[in-house]
Structure formats: structure tokens, C-alpha cells
Image (cartoon, grey):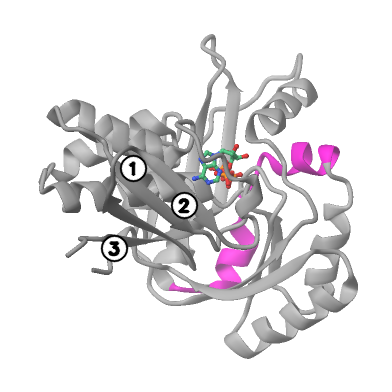
Amino acid sequence: MTQTVTVRVPAKVNVQLAVGGARPDGFHDLANVFLAVGLYDEVSVTPADELRVTCEGPDAAQVPLDRTNLAARAALELARRYGLDPAVHLHITKDIPVAGGMAGGSADGAGALLACDTLWGTNASREELLDICAELGSDVPFSLVGGAALGTGRGEMLRPLEVGGTFHWVFAMAERGLSTPAVFREFDRMNEGLRVPEPVASQDLLDALAKGDAGALARTVSNDLQPAALSLFPELAGTLAAGRAAGALAALVSGSGPTTAHLAPDEETARTIGRELLASGTCRTVRVTRSPAPGATVLG
Ligand code: ATP
């Protein structure tokens, strides 16, 4: 009998993304409030003759299938630490947009890690799994834990946050992707010679999350990368405006973009916003979903 382990992993939206100035190592300090949303990739792992990655889904053609894929890198790192042969077939069923600012690659890294840990019986501690995630990328630890969390440092030091209710969202996917490093470079260019303040989490925003108060959350969401994303992708301003006109309490670029996130007061309004955004012709597709969502979960 062939053994397969499948793990489901959520996408994220940053309800606050405060970005500090470039550090000497080129990275930026962040105050990053992550919220997992109900849009998922699934990663399945099956024993095979050698390490292999396949991917299905609307954006599958843009996903690298070599060892640069974050799922492959996760499997290789766990195998290296435990002296195992990483001979597995990793299959990604991709629903999270690629290069969309929703941490899709990070989700696959966290998913593959948990799937391999389960398949191989390595039983790595939560701490070790989080350590491997942080090595793979700043957004990967959050994909493992899900829910809501405040990320500091490069975003990889996580503090879980309380969420007191359900938030309804519409995500509008763009016609093309945006490279995260390119958006940070544009942020640096736009802030050259300016004094960039230390990134600090907004207490009002954390209170809004804890209360589950969508109106208060809408008043406090912010994304310091938004001006840079809009500078590289000016059409996104039209998508944000269309979402607001359709009834969104707030509309912002998700992470480094180009996906835009539209916060709705309730599920019915979210469906209306989704229909109107699609009809506006300012995006490729829309997804109506809710948050928070659980982190990486073994399905079987
Ligand atoms: P983030 O929100 O964390 O900045 P993103 O959602 O904007 O990331 P990803 O979908 O994670 O972007 O992809 C960024 C790049 O990473 C892709 O263009 C691709 O070359 C590479 N990549 C590596 N592994 C994967 C993967 N499993 N899925 C998608 N892209 C991957």
C-alpha cells in the first residue's frame, strides 16, 4: 500500500505591515500582523525513487518544480537534519495565487515540512519545525501556526494574537504577479534620504482583532508597502477604489501585492463586493472568504 500524507495550509493577509528602513544586511525590520484566511494549498507527500515536485491549479505553470521550490527545500532540510533520504513525490494542489502577496510559496514550504515530518515519523518538536520554517523564509513560520500573529524582526519572530470573531474578506487577484524583492527595492527608492520610523504594531488594531470588530479593524489596517506596490502596478488603485465603491469597509494591497484585500461588514456584503469587483474589470478573479483560518493541518 502506498502511503500518502496530505497537509492543508492557509494563505495570509497582513492587516498591518509596518516596514522600517533598510538594515545594513539589506533586510527590513517589520511589525507584521498576519491573519490566516480560508484560501488553501494542499501538499501531498508520497515515498518515491527520488525527490520530485508536481503542481496542479490555475497558476501551476508559474511554480518552479526544481529544488528551489519551497516545498522541496523544506523536505531537503528536514531530511538533512535527520540523516534521511529525501526520496519523496511532493504534489501541490495550488489555490493560493502565485506571487500574489499571500504567502503561497511559504504555505507550501510549511505544508511539505509537516507532511514529511508525519510521513517519516521524525516527530520534530514544534520549536524545531518553526526553526526550519524561519530558515526557509520570513513568512513560513506563520503558515505553520495560522490564526493571527504579530511578526517582528524580519517577520519570523511570532507572537500569537487573539481574534474575537470572524472577518469577511474579498480578495481580488491581478492579471500578473509582483516580485516581493522588487517591491522592497521600490520602497527603498521611494524612501531614500527620508527618516523611516521604527515599525511598531498598532495597539488599536490588535484591540480590533481581539474584539472581532470589523469596523474598528477597517479604521486601523495599514500597509507600508502599498505605495511601492502601487508605484509598480498603478492599475491596482482602480481595484481598491472599485472594492470601496462596492461596500468594502477597507481595501488594501495584501503584503507586497498585487492581490488586493477588501474587508466586508458581513458575508452577504462580501458576496456583493466580489460580484461587483469582478464586473468592474479591474481584476482577473475574486475569492470570497473569511478569517481567521487554522495553520498547517494534516488531513490524512
Ligand atoms: P509573499 O506573500 O510571502 O511575499 P507571494 O505570495 O507574493 O509571497 P509566492 O507565491 O510565494 O509569492 O511566490 C514567489 C516566488 O517564489 C514565485 O514567483 C516562485 O518563483 C517562487 N516559489 C518557490 N516555491 C514556490 C511554491 N511552492 N509556490 C509558488 N511559488 C514558489
Cβ–Cβ under 8 Å for marks 3 and 2: no
Q: Position of residue 196 (x, y in %)?
A: 65, 24
Relative to residue 241, is residue 132 depicted above or below? above
Q: Are marks 2 and 1 in contact (CB under 8 Å)?
A: yes
Residue 61: image x %, image y %? 65, 50
Q: Earlier in the sequence, mark 2 or mark 1?
A: 2
How packed mark 2 is, by other alpha carbons closer than 10 Å (few <14, some 14-19, many 20 or more), is many
Q: Is there any visible trace of residue 30 in the rendered image?
A: yes
Q: CA distance from mark 3 to mark 2?
A: 18 Å
Q: Quadrant of residue 87?
A: top left
Residue at mark 2: C-beta within 8 A of ligand 1: no
Q: Amino acid at mark 1?
A: Leu
Element type at marker 2? strand
Q: Earlier in the sequence, mark 3 or mark 2?
A: 2
In this rendered view, identify the residue nearer to me: 227 or 87.
Answer: 87
Tell me the magenta residue range. 212-232
Image-based side of 248 in relation to 169, left or right? right
User: How far apart, in angstroms, are the residues tagged by discs 2 and 1?
Assistant: 9 Å
Q: Residue 109 in magenta?
A: no
Quarter of the image for the C terminus: give it: bottom left
* Residue type indicated by callout 2: Phe
User: What residue is at 69 percent from the left and 55 percent from the top?
Assistant: 259
Q: For disc 3, does the CB lie below 8 Å from ligand 1?
A: no
Q: Residue at x 72, y 74 (%)?
A: 248
- Looking at the image, tell me whether mark 3 or mark 1 is earlier in sequence order: 1
Residue at the disc numbered 3: 297
Q: Residue furthest toward the bottom?
A: 268
- SS label for mark 1: strand
Q: Residues within 10 Å of mark 3 (few under 14, many from 20)?
A: some
Q: Which residue is mark 2?
A: 34
